[in-house]
Image: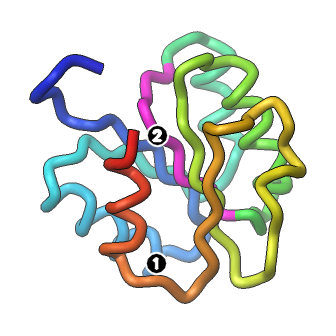
Amino acid sequence: MAENQPIRVVLVEDEEAVCRLLEGYLRRAGCLVTSYPNAQPLLAELQDAALLCDVAVVDLSLPDLPGEQVAARLLAALPSVRVVVTSGLPWDPRSLPQGQGRVSFLQKPFRPAQLLELVQAG
């Protein structure tokens, strides 16, 4: 990513209120945010090679596909993407060995500033 370019963030979160809160916070911080309520529209764009992102924020519990599978597909398709997995349940980033060094975990509830720190860490 070039210097001074906004960070492109994909947000996959099925809880609408949480999604809007995080989306607004990241946008105010200067990120370009595209949000999805579930995995299917994201995976369709990924398959069509239309998805451009630097960081993907993926909820572990999505209604249509486990967030871990979504993260694995993103990591496989986009070699430079970083993934932040969020969940109210404990989770270990080592469960995605292909994402070593590219996957972070943020346990809910978290402060938006904690998410922004991980998004900007790259």
Q: Quadrant of the C terminus?
A: top left
> Residue type at mark 2?
Val
Dots 2 and 1: beta carbons under 8 Å? no
Q: Left or right: where does residue 34 sit relative to residue 45?
A: left
Determine which of the numbered discs, if any, sits on residue 55 in the image. Answer: 2
| Residue 61 drawn at (x, y percent) | 77, 68
Q: Secondary structure at mark 1?
A: helix
For the rendered model, the colour scheme is rainbow
Q: Quadrant of the N terminus?
A: top left
Where is residue 64, by image quadrant?
A: bottom right
Dot 1 corresponds to which residue?
18
Q: Residues within 10 Å of mark 1 (few under 14, many from 20)?
A: few
Where is residue 104, by image quadrant?
A: bottom right
Q: Secondary structure at mark 2?
A: strand
Task: Please state which of residues 22 and 110 is positioned toward the viewer in this rendering.
Answer: 110
- What residue do we see at 80% from left, 78% from top? 90
- What residue do we see at 35% from left, 61% from top? 117
Task: Please state which of residues 97 and 74 is positioned toward the viewer in this rendering.
Answer: 97
Q: Which residues are magenta?
A: 51-59
